[in-house]
Amino acid sequence: MTARKTALGLLLLLSACGGGGGGPVDGGGTTAAETVAGYCDQFWTAYAARWAICDRASAAYWAAFYAPALRCGDPVQAVTAGRATYDQARATACLGFLAAGSCDAIEAQVSGRLLQADCQAAVTGLLGAGATCHSPESCASDVCLESPYCPSACFTPHVLGASCTDEPLCVPGLHCDRRYAPTAFTCQPLEAQGRFCVDDADCQLGLRCDTGAPGASCQPRRTSGYCADDGYCAVGYACKSGSCVWPKAAGETCTQGQNQCAAGLWCSGGACRDGPAAGQSCTAVNGETPPCIGAACVSGTCVAWSEGGACTTAAQCAPGASCVYPGTCAMPCPEP
């Protein structure tokens, strides 16, 4: 499954797991549920637990962020309405990938940058190119573009060597080459270390587009040095005070006020601990603000994320939802 993401100013809706391709792999001993609803719950529960390990972060924090209740509506409704099919064998293999895949590969799966074949085929959309869609789960191509309309239309990404001048969207594992001839504006394999790039999506796993002198090129994500956000840093590292650092995990000793702990954790009582839950205080202590779990910090109190309630900022809305006029949290174009 993948998360919805924004790309080049368009809301690119990559499927939670559609498309097909390749044969199943060993499921790693975990059998997927018979229903897509059960499988979706398994997928996001397993992903949250695995990502907490990769990120050295709070398991509770990522469990709330990737809660199945926030992410399973579209695939379940697409299958229920007959716009998609569910393959239990491929779903089982996908769960095996979550158990055994590298942290870089698992991150790429959920971002939609490079999809694992079984996860891509566990739920397969049935609508062809140009068909009206609300989410990628219904599209055979896994892509439903909004710009900014809802509903929109299924779009077939370009294959290797195809022109991408009309829409810079290539199949996962490729990118729209924006260099000079003869490959300019055609879909090409992701770039290796040292190769020219325009943004991070041009580079292979574990690399990012470094725009420093003498020119932009794909370079390893950093384990030290300057960063503007966590995307600059290798998996397991975090961007803190402008530098990539190895953060402290749950239970490790820390000094309050130095912001040393990993995502969802803060320094309390001399050790990194989970942040507060909804209803608890999130007031800064000694210069360190505790991160709310499954909630937003509003006027010093953690307030549970909302899917359809009132909001003044996007931070008050559940992951994936936006604060839209006249101040209501709304999910983007849900399956009818």
Image (spheres, rainbow, N blue to C red):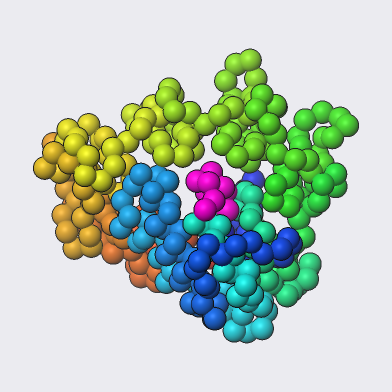
Residue 204 visible? The answer is yes
Residue 124 vertical placement versus 264 (above, below) = below
Residue 328 visible? The answer is no
Residue 46 part of the magenta segment: no
Residue at left offset 35%, top offset 32%: 246
* Residue toward you, 121 or 306: 121
The chief SS type of the magenta part is helix
Residue 297 is situated, as x and y percent measured from the top left of the image, at 26, 53
Residue 183 found in image quarter: top right
* Residue toward you, 160 or 93: 93
As drawn, is 47 to the left or to the right of 257? right
* Residue toward you, 104 or 267: 104
As drawn, is 336 to the left or to the right of 308? right
Residue at left offset 85%, top offset 44%: 161
As drawn, is 28 to the left or to the right of 50? right
Q: Residue furthest top?
A: 214
Residue 94 found in image quarter: bottom right
The magenta stretch spans which residues? 100-109
Residue 318 is situated, as x and y percent measured from the top left of the image, at 39, 63
Residue 102 part of the magenta segment: yes
Residue at left offset 38%, top offset 51%: 52
Residue 185 vertical placement versus 78 (above, below) = above
Residue at left offset 32%, top offset 36%: 247
Where the N terminus falls, by quadrant? bottom right
Residue 210 is situated, as x and y percent measured from the top left of the image, at 58, 26
Q: How many labels were placed on the picture?
A: 0
Where the C terminus falls, by quadrant? bottom right
Q: Residue furthest left?
A: 269
Residue 296 is situated, as x and y percent measured from the top left of the image, at 29, 56
Q: Residue furthest bottom?
A: 81
